[in-house]
Image (cartoon, rainbow, N blue to C red):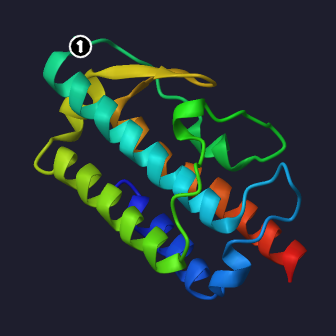
């Protein structure tokens, strides 16, 4: 649905190949480990789901043009993650990360279950780089965001091996 399941599967498949001791390692002091990247994905999806739920309950409809969210995977454009979605070191194993990611995905899917695309296209909220995006685009963004960070995970793994 919205491409998020296929993109998540790519992340999970990659993470299953990473030993826990490698998943905890950072290539540099200011870098994130693979587990911290996974925690960021978890926190991000939680935040997006919260905002989607809030808009569906309290938001007002607005016409919002589609944004080129597929460009999210371009890592040449750096974005500082807001404090609320920066990892705090909550995961110590790949299994913990995968369990948390499954939980955040369950929340997202529950929110959009039985919602027509037209409903998700009527409401929007702000993205720091793209501006206002519809709820539908926010759901799709989750997958593109995960692919961006999958590339980061692969870079981290290559540098610590």
Whether residue 143 is visible, yes or no, is: no
Whole-percent x, y for residue 101 in the image: 41, 63
Whether residue 42 is visible, yes or no, is: yes
Residue lying at 16% horizontally and 41% vertically, measured from the top left: 116
Identify the residue at the far left of this view. 114
85 and 143: which is toward the camera: 85
Which SS class for mark 1? loop
Residue lying at 76% horizontally and 71% vertically, measured from the top left: 25
**Can you identify the residue that label 1 sits on?**
61
16 left or right of 129 in image: left
Residue lying at 69% horizontally and 82% vertically, measured from the top left: 21
Which quarter of the image is occupied by the C terminus?
bottom right
151 left or right of 60 in image: right
Q: Quadrant of residue 10?
A: bottom right
13 and 82: which is toward the camera: 82
Whole-percent x, y for residue 72 in the image: 65, 43
Q: Quadrant of residue 105?
A: bottom left
Number of numbered markers: 1
Whole-percent x, y for residue 1 in the image: 31, 59
Residue lying at 44% horizontally and 73% vertically, measured from the top left: 96
88 and 48: which is toward the camera: 88
105 left or right of 44 in image: left
- Binning the other alpha carbons within 10 Å of mark 1 as few (below 14), some (14 to 19) or many (20 upward) gives some
């Amino acid at each position: 649905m919205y491409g998020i399941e296929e993109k998540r599967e790519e992340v999970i498949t990659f993470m299953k190949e990473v030993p826990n001791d490698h998943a905890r390692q950072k290539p540099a002091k200011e870098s994130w480990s693979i587990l911290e990247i996974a925690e960021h994905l978890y926190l991000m999806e939680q935040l997006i789901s919260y905002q989607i739920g809030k808009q569906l309950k309290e938001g007002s409809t607005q016409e919002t043009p589609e944004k080129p969210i597929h460009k999210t995977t371009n890592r040449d454009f750096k974005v500082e993650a807001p404090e609320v979605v920066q990892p705090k070191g909550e995961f110590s194993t790949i299994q913990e990360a995968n369990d948390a990611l499954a939980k955040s995905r369950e929340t997202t899917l529950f929110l959009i279950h039985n919602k027509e695309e037209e409903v998700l296209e009527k409401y929007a909220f702000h993205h720091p780089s793209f501006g206002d995006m519809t709820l539908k685009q926010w759901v799709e963004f989750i997958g593109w965001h995960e692919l961006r960070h999958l590339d980061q995970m692969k870079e981290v793994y290559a540098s610590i091996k």
